[in-house]
Image (cartoon, helix red, strand yellow):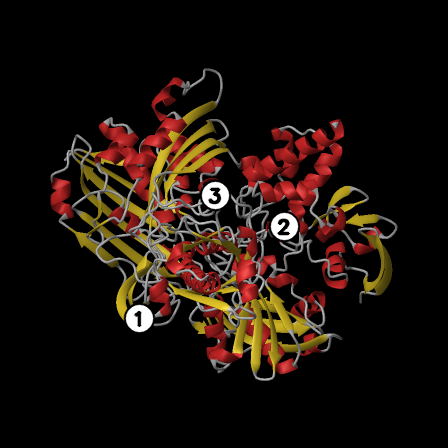
Amino acid sequence: MARKTSKSVDPKPKRFVATVVEIEGREETRIVELPAWNPEPWTDDVALTIVGARHPRADGAEKAAGRARYTADVRRPGMLHAAILRARIAAGHVAELHVADALSIAGVRDVIWSVPNAEHGGFPLFDHAVHYAGQPIAAVCADTPELAHAGLRAIRVRYEATAHAVTPRDALAQDAPLVRGGNGNRMEGSPRIVERGDVDRGLAAADVIVRGEYCTPVALHTALEPHGAVAEWDGDRLIVWESTQGIFAVRGDLARVFELPLSHVRVIMQYMGGGFGAKNDAGPHTYAAAEFARRLGKPVRCVNDREGEQLDSGNRPATVQRVTLGAMRDGTLTAIVVDADIPLGIGGWEGGPAQIYQEMYRCDNVRTSETFVYINASAMSSFRAPGHVEGAFGLERSMDELALSLGIDPIDLRLKNYADRDQKKDRPYSAKHLRECYAQGAARFGWGERTRTPNTERRSPRRRGFGLASQVWGGGGGPPAYASVRINPDGSAEVLTGTQDLGTGARTVFAQIAAEALGHELSAVRVVLGDTERTPATGNSWGSITTASVGPAVRMAAEDARNQLLLGAAELMKVDASALEARAGVVRVRRGKRSLSFRDIMGALRGAMIIGTGSRGPNPDGVAISTFGVQLAEVEVDMETGIVRVLRITAAHDAGRIINPELAESQLHGGIIQGLGYALFEERVLDRSLGIPMNPNMHDYKVPTMIDVPDIDAFFVGGGDSTANHTGAKGMAEPPIIPTAPAIANAVADAIGAPVSELPLTPWRVLAAIADGRTNIEKTKP
Amino acid sequence: MIHDLTLHLTVNGAAHDVRVPASATLLDVLRDSLVLTGTKLVCDRGECGACTVLVDGEPAYACLTLAAQCETREVRTIEGLGGDDGRLSALQSAFVAHDALQCGFCTPGQIVAAYALLERNATPSEDEIKRWMSGNLCRCGTYPKIVRAIQAAAGATRGSRGA
């Protein structure tokens, strides 16, 4: 199909337009490039053979063989090792820092306690004013990691501690210490209030009102590969291997701090042991490695140890959500109100729980209020669906309490309040298949038959319960994203794009998209990513935007390359290019017998290289692009011990076209299992009086193990969203973590016959909920 | 002061002499002296299983094993568990085929642990797999597919033995 050939030969000039882009739930207006042409949308009636098929992960063999080189595995000649000293107090300052003993150790090369221009958490890096326990104070560089740690132990620090505040209540008290100086501990602009309609009128009109207070914990990403960097200078050029979700973002950070042109900084990330939102910027380890490398003239590696990683590499902030729902007797919501406190740590961004309250259900009267509070703790960061995971717990628990008080089935209540359009943005959805998610999820779970399982077996302390929760998230992606596709003289093809594969499968899905668009064999296409010097720029891999942002650019580049190849073939075969088509690496004359392989064509073109280029155009105006899903859970609760076992989870998700169902299903599993950890185990414990985290390790901060994982039936509903972008794909890495914890919590509440309002559902919290019975959710009839 | 030792180690069938501090762990030696970086450092205290290797056929946390304990013993790492000609073994292939890896950082430890399981029990039940593997943490959530991969590899092994 050469329908766009003429346009690629005679491209229209590029133009730039303002468009709205959404990342991690935040919308902003940006000027973006309008591509000179756009591929025809892959609608559901277009036959695709490689896209949509289950292909093994492109880098699976390297990973299974132990050959994949992660940042922590990079070895450079003469490489030295750096380690970071962290504050042991929550607030105060470093009165004395004695480094002579460290420097006297044979093999310890250098100690630093400042890097000009570098910041961390909004303060100078290695600030000697201490703002939280775990804050970097200094760094040591030595011949081996062991010697670097010996150097840390030899540094003597005298701290002068001052009063700290590590809970929102302490931070908002009258005489609270000022965590960031300034006027108080509320973030500027707090409370952030968003209101539509009139909630007072909505509550006055309600037949039933439910109120509850919901608490969520601080969760730690706990990626198995910690943050780390290897830095090496080549004259005035800086090369950094970094475990990052954003190679170009790290390049920008380094260029700024070391006052270099962007052209003199190269950032590489080939394999990465998980990010989950915590690895979007350069960090103390990056700056320390680059600064030591500059001072010592040798490559330097700085990788967080596990304690450092758990202490200070970002987190999902805690929330307290006071929720009020008003409804008519038939279940129609008349008002949704949430008032939330979010302790961010010493810094971070406004990743609060409000948005899902504004968008999930149809309701004309909604008011959300979020108070972001600074406390003496490590700064929050994005963590897989930031805000929505927290908000879904308060909202979906409240919906179940409402369903119970109205005597309405939880699914019926949600269908009664189904949002046909995005009321937050006041736009219709580009596509929404949540209704089918409820229907298929309920059918496969057996929701209608659930009461047949005995809820109370006599003599057994174990009770079964059932619950569900819904989800909405963005994932529409957007510009900027660029790609190029090269066809080599032997016919093999390379996709070059400056994105990252965090373990999500980006390498694999972009190879599939490119092979489909090129008309090539998948095995003949290699994706080159994760290197700022070799690839055109693309944004961070966050907000579930990568497939929907980069995919269209890759497809356009591949079609551009294919069209050029067809022009070459047309010349060789003496036919018009429009009579040719490419499939499986062969160009054929349509309705004819003649054909030439890509290899033959490129061979005949004698060293010519075909380079296709592609970019991501803006999103369509006037629609909201979102992803949806529902999860249903069955649990068993031991009423005597409070131990919860999740028996099974059914997950139905709508995320547009699925490029690779095998890998996408893996993402659903991953979200559900992290959500299960959030529901049952995961909680940073920060001692209020000491101000110090008590569990910065993987034994006391518990992530799920294989034993904890239930039977999971996870699948996708609905087809491609070709309104969203011409590939029809949307993001789906974050959505599956959103409904898991509330679905489990609703099932636990069902099992014990009492509400649960605080995560994680550790045995003592469950026992307390059983003891409290139904007293802590207030229901009133006005 | 910690003294250096010269150790004679046999790793994946190859003999190595390394000079390291007496306190060096097997993990330090594998990763830093021998540059066998397939074995991963994650928790450094026996909590996650990412550094699992075989010492005389027994699974061991390399982060909790002193290198000096391994003289005269046979150490095998993920790099030594491949098939012939640098190909993947049946177990490794099953991990790829069932997408039992995402970021891949825990994968070497998972595969070594699964290998040790199948050496002991060629036909493990699902419950036996889950219990044996529960010391190997995965943050991406590949557990359901790891179970499938191990079951598939066990089945393939049975098939080939029967043939």
Instruction: From the image, state whether disc 3 or disc 1 is nearer to you.
Output: 1
Residue A404, picture quadrant? top left
- CA gap, disc 2 and disc 3: 19 Å
**A457 up-or-down from A6: above or below:** above
Picture coordinates of residue A94 (x, y %)? 53, 73
The residue located at (29%, 64%) in the rendering is A28
Question: Mark 2 = which residue?
Answer: A61
In the displayed orientation, state which residue is furthest to the top: A458
| Residue B106 shows in this picture | yes
Same-chain status of marks 2 and 3? yes
Pointer 1 chain = A
Local secondary structure at mark 1: loop
Q: Amino acid at mark 2?
A: Ala
Kind of residue indicated by mark 1: Lys
Residue at mark 1: A12
Circle 2 Cα neighbour tier, 10 Å, few/some/many (<14 / 14–19 / ≥20): some
Percent of width and height locating residue A625: 29, 52
- State the residue in front, A774 or A292: A292
Q: Quadrant of the C terminus of chain B?
A: top right
Which structural element holds mark 3?
Answer: loop
